[in-house]
Amino acid sequence: MANVYSWVKETGEQNANSDGDINWAEGQAPSTVNNSSRAELASHARFYEAAHGILTTTGAALSYALTTELQNPTTTLRDGLLFSFKAHINSGDDPTFNVDATGPKKLYRPDLTQVKTNGILVNQHYAVKYDSTLDSGNGGWVLFGTGLGTNSSETIKEVWTFEKGIAYGGAGQGTLLYTGTESQIKLAAAATGHVVDFDGTPAARTEPAGATMSGDQTVVTQEKGNYQYLQREEAEVAIASAATTDLGSVRDYRMNVTGTVTITSFGAGTNLRKLLRFSGALTLTYNATSLILPTAADITTAAGDVAEFVSDASGNWRCVNYERASGEALAVNQKPLGQDQSLSTFTGGERPANTWFLNNTGQTIFVFLRFDAGAGGVGIELSPDGGTTIEQFHNVLVGTGNRDSVTFPVPEGFSYRTTAATWFRWTELRA
């Protein structure tokens, strides 16, 4: 049988007897002319059928077959072989294509990703072109056509990431809720859009074109952007404070931390993000590895404080945002002199001579000293540690009949004292 694939593109003697049914050799017998011409015309007609969508595939959703009358033209598959056909069935995941029983080869989309479920649609017209470099050199067919379907596991245009346990919704979009368990998700059409609920029945699950469900997150893609206006909606749930307050044990993003028990750990949950609101005063214990807090110090919460925490792949938690209900910053600079301070008067028993007193009020204080007449030389000393005198701040010589006074500041964290045996009045501006 004459076969167009047996011919070569060169002219002359190379095509003289390239096909057993066609004889164009020099000096051929006149009786062979009409048969050779007729065989050549029949070969072109068969090629027309194979290349112009006249034929329909057979086989199954994962193993398409195409039978031509080209006398096994692909016994030796060559790059560029082109066939056109009408599909008889929708495709499944990763189907193959077999021309004239030459062996199944994988089918690829023009972007060279494999065809998936519904990538080929029944009664649609397609063309395939052979490429020997596909499938790691084993060869494959590239699929073309206006009837290309949407691969159900393929990302097409727009991608949204949904967190486990969060409900999403928007105007005209209905509600989508994801628990992170693939076998529990079910998508159904509704008048207001799409609604996702959970019945635990994998067989009943339906997914939109372009949906992939896996692990603790799901990525939903839509060619036309049907979920473009999705918004997250979730209620706040309560969790009791404990030494180990396991945030990973609750799937919700927003939590109300109740109680006043000191927290030293948020558990070992990995790659999580939680928004916490504290109901009262408790201590968050700083840990440089497992509970990293702003200012690298413990935090005492107050009712209404809000904080956001994230965990890494090892279950270590870090506070990425903390807002006090009062509006104050976590690290407050020293208050200016006079703020929240008043004058306090002390007795001799409260301020004996040669005794160090620590300023631990959180801000600078002022000391006012008035000495008795005839007190003689009086020393005023400051120290950063209550033992090492770094400065003899003042030396007062109090004469007979005089009551001299000294006023001096004491920075936060410094200690102070007087060496005078007696004094008349001791007053401090302090908190």
Image (cartoon, rainbow, N blue to C red):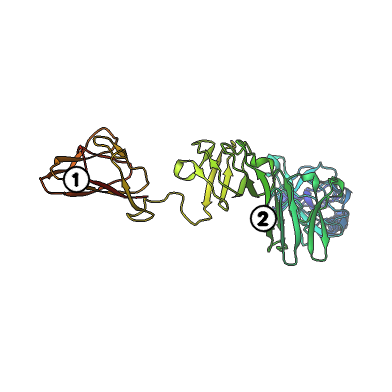
Q: Return the x and y of residue 335 as percentages of the image width and height.
A: 37, 53
Residue 94 occupies which quadrant of the picture?
top right
The answer to whether residue 142 is visible is: no
Q: Position of residue 416 (x, y in %)?
A: 27, 40
For the residue carrying disc 1, how many other residues have a C-alpha within 10 Å: few (<14), some (14-19), or many (20+)? many
Q: Tag 1's secondary structure?
A: loop
Determine which residue is flagged by label 2. 160
Label 1 sits on what residue type? Answer: Phe
How much space separates mark 2 and mark 1, taking CA atoms? 77 Å
Q: Secondary structure at mark 2?
A: strand
Residue at position x 63%, y 46% in the image: 258
Q: Which residue is mark 1?
A: 371
**First along the sequence among labels 2 and 1:** 2
Q: Residue furthest top?
A: 387
Q: Nearer the viewer, mark 2 or mark 1?
A: 1
Closest to the observer, 175 or 38: 175
**At x 87% / y 46%, what residue is drawn?**
203
> Mark number for residue 140?
none
Total numbered circles: 2
Which kind of residue does numbered mark 2 sit on? Answer: Trp
Taking the view exactly as shown, the residue that stands out farthest to the left is 400
Given residues 151 and 256, the one toward you in this image is 256
Is 101 on the left-hand or right-hand side of 176?
right
